[in-house]
Amino acid sequence: MPPISTSDSPATAGGVTGLFGGTFDPVHLGHLRLAEEAADRLGLSEVRWIPAGQPTHRETPSVNAQNRLAMVQLAIARNPRFTLDATEVASAQPSYTVPTLRRLRQEASGTGERPLVLLLGADAFAGLPDWRDWTDLFALAHIAIAHRPGFPIEPGNLPPALAEVFRARYRASPEVLREAPAGHIVSFAMTQLDISATQIRTLLRNARSARYLLPDAVIDYIRREHLYCKE
Ligand code: ATP
């Protein structure tokens, strides 16, 4: 099992750290390939997974935070580049990304101005203006956008305020991620997997197989804990 980080455990010193948040309700192979391919293509020394406790800009997850955390822990257990951050799950407060980034930036202060890169699927990036204090993000981290089926990354598809920020901050080469601690936007191609947690929840609710869409260990956990069953 990977170590679970708490607020006082510094991330790996040196290198570029990827931060991957989500509800992970449940975690699936789309998430895992995104994190793995980001690590390869962007040269990340670590991808820190941050399951949301109580997300505020979307619907309440159907499974509680401890179960979602446990599923991510099972899914990433054998990957030495992946670590798990339980701070949002442990917090009684609603999850907001900007305070989480501020905390991680403070943790990183002992290792200089280490670059932090927030990893987002293209759909999540397009929804950024719904996040609290979203414009503050760029002082704290870079953003790397993963291509996702059905969500082309073009300014014309973005809300106007975000399109403007995208035009100003987008760089074609991921090399820029090492040149500054924060502030750039890059994108990366990943194996296109049209998998969503919504699709998996629907399959499971209808007693249909979700096998090969998510790790077997996570399927076993879902069965054992009777998650996503028909009400
Ligand atoms: P839901 O269907 O419940 O909305 P989801 O499958 O989109 O869930 P989240 O936990 O909301 O999963 O997503 C976490 C992050 O992973 C987001 O940045 C999202 O864009 C990205 N992501 C999820 N699935 C994919 C996929 N198949 N390809 C690329 N990115 C993905």
Image (cartoon, helix red, strand yellow):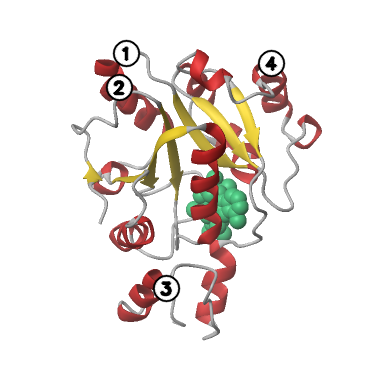
Q: Position of residue 158 (x, y in %)?
A: 73, 34
Query: If you read the primary sequence from the N terminus, does the residue marked by circle 4 or circle 2 appear first?
Result: 2
Evaluate whether residue 55 shows in this view: yes
The three-letter amino acid code for the residue at tag 4 is Ala
> Could you give the CA–CA distance between mark 4 and mark 3, rounded to whole angstroms?
43 Å
Q: Which residue was labeled with disc 1? A: 112
The three-letter amino acid code for the residue at tag 3 is Asp
The three-letter amino acid code for the residue at tag 1 is Gly
- Judging from the image, what secondary structure is the residue with disc 2 in? helix
Evaluate whether residue 58 shows in this view: no
Q: Which residue was labeled with disc 4? A: 168
The three-letter amino acid code for the residue at tag 2 is Ala
| Mark 4 residue crowding within 10 angstroms, few (<14) / some (14–19) / many (20+) | few
- Viewer-side residue, 166 vs 38: 38
- Viewer-side residue, 59 vs 186: 186
Query: If you read the primary sequence from the N terminus, does the residue marked by circle 1 or circle 4 appear first?
Result: 1
Q: Which residue was labeled with disc 2? A: 108
| Mark 3 residue crowding within 10 angstroms, few (<14) / some (14–19) / many (20+) | some
| Mark 1 residue crowding within 10 angstroms, few (<14) / some (14–19) / many (20+) | few
For residue 216, the mark is: 3
- At 37% from the left and 14% from the top, the residue drawn is 113
- Viewer-side residue, 28 vs 94: 28
Quarter assignment of residue 124: top right
Eye-nearest disc, 4 or 3: 3
- Judging from the image, what secondary structure is the residue with disc 4 in? helix
